[in-house]
Image (cartoon, rainbow, N blue to C red):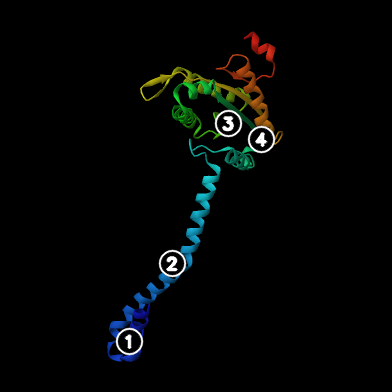
Amino acid sequence: MILQVAVLSIPVLSRNIVDITAPLQAILISHLILATLSALLLPFLLFSNTEYTLSNLANTDSLTQLFNRRGFFNKAKESLNHLSNKGKSVSIIILDIDFFKRVNDKYGHDTGDHAIKWIAQSIKEQFMNAGISARIGGEEFAILLPDYTLNAARESAEYLRENISKQPFYYQGTYINLSVSAGVSSTINGKMSIKDLLSLADKRLYLAKETGRDKVVTLDERQLLLQN
């Protein structure tokens, strides 16, 4: 900085080299402006990047890189408040890995973690551009589907369930058959809170597990489910 000021002073000290220093002045002045702007903007950029990183960490599940429960509710609220989704159907799928404790007990928690990641990858591949996916519990996942009717969401959940059932999970030389149970709920956007919609889907997930597992439930009638 001192050297730049000294060079800028050359025209005052010697008029014989004005023609040389004039373009140099312009260059040095531009450098001074850039240096000043950098000094002012750098803290702001660093703060913004840190804030984004912290927000991302707070809303993301570290194992699967899906949203966590907090991130799910935040993103779901943001999505459903968007004008393009007003007055449309919205559905939620909640699913759980069947007999997951047996996987942990028989193969160990490291295998269990990789099984969770494998299920999460299946969810990402199917719903990446369609909904908001999250790991909301140990082996429990939720998928919010804006502009999906109950039937459309049920079909998507069935497709996911079938894919998981027919493709054994492979880890460290061992094939493990996994299955999932799912509950699906739907409403018109604005008629029911996300929390209540999730709670209804969770109730149907419980019925799926209670009445046989490896199935998708969209009803609330236990006796009818037992007949199927």
At a point 53% along the width and 33% down the height, the residue shown is 130
Do residues under tags 1 and 4 come within 8 Å of each other at their CB atoms?
no
Within-10-Å neighbours for mark 1: few <14, some 14–19, many 20+: some
Eye-nearest disc, 1 or 3: 3
At a point 63% along the width and 39% down the height, the residue shown is 80
Which of the 4 image quadrants contains residue 195? top right
Where does label 2 land, which residue? 38
Q: Which amino acid does label 1 sit on?
A: Ile
Of labels 1 and 3, earlier in sequence is 1
Label 2 – label 3 distance at C-alpha: 44 Å
Nearer to the camera, 98 or 3: 98
Of labels 2 and 1, earlier in sequence is 1
Label 2 – label 1 distance at C-alpha: 26 Å
Of labels 4 and 3, earlier in sequence is 3
Label 4 – label 2 distance at C-alpha: 44 Å
* Number of marks in picture: 4
Where does label 4 land, which residue? 194
Residue 86 place in picture, x, y as percent = 66, 38
Of labels 4 and 2, earlier in sequence is 2
Label 4 – label 3 distance at C-alpha: 11 Å
Of labels 2 and 3, earlier in sequence is 2
Q: What residue type is labelled 4?
A: Ile
Q: Which structural element holds mark 3?
A: strand
Left or right of 16 in this view: 142 = right
Where does label 3 land, which residue? 142
Where does label 1 land, which residue? 10
